[in-house]
Amino acid sequence: MALEVKKREGETLAAFLYRFNKRIKNSGLIKEARKRQTRKRSPNKRVRRASAIYRLNKEAEISRTKKYG
């Protein structure tokens, strides 16, 4: 996504920079760039399996406690 901001005739540099910064912030470019800066690695098979087992055990524990009140 490319943003184009041109300096208006008779516009001061400070006003131009203010307008430019405002346009960049509103466009979401900074947010997107920061998001793409670091990439989360997907968990490996062992970690996914351990997580699934933990989830199943937790669900069983919760259902057991609901059953007993």
Image (cartoon, rainbow, N blue to C red):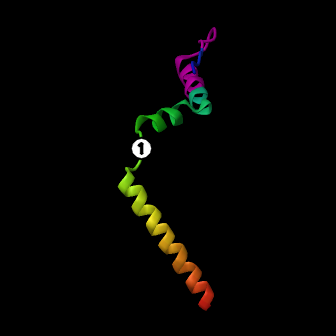
Residue drawn at x 59%, y 16% as measured from the top left: 5
Residue drawn at x 53%, y 17% as measured from the top left: 13
> In this image, 46 relative to 14: left or right?
left
Q: Is residue 18 depicted above or below 2 in this figure?
A: below
Looking at the picture, how far across and down is residue 47, in whole percent?
38, 57
Looking at the picture, how far across and down is residue 3, in whole percent?
58, 19
Residue drawn at x 61%, y 26% as measured from the top left: 23
> Foreground residue, 69 or 26?
69
Q: How many marks?
A: 1
> In this image, 44 relative to 69: left or right?
left
The verdict on residue 26 being magenta is no
Question: Counting other residues with Cα less than 10 Å from the Cα at mark 1, is it few (<14), some (14-19), or many (20 or more)?
Answer: few
The kind of secondary structure element at disc 1 is loop
> From which residue to which does the magenta span run?
6-21
> Foreground residue, 53 or 27?
53
Q: Is residue 5 depicted above or below 66 in this figure?
A: above
Looking at the picture, how far across and down is residue 20, in whole percent?
57, 23
Q: Quadrant of residue 63?
A: bottom right
Q: Is residue 23 depicted above or below 46 in this figure?
A: above
> Foreground residue, 58 or 11?
58
Quadrant location of the C terminus?
bottom right
The verdict on residue 18 being magenta is yes
Looking at the picture, how far across and down is residue 41, in whole percent?
39, 44
Q: Which residue is mark 1?
A: 40
Residue drawn at x 40%, y 50% as measured from the top left: 43
Task: Spot the residue most to the bottom.
Answer: 68
Quadrant location of the N terminus?
top right
Q: Amino acid at mark 1?
A: Lys
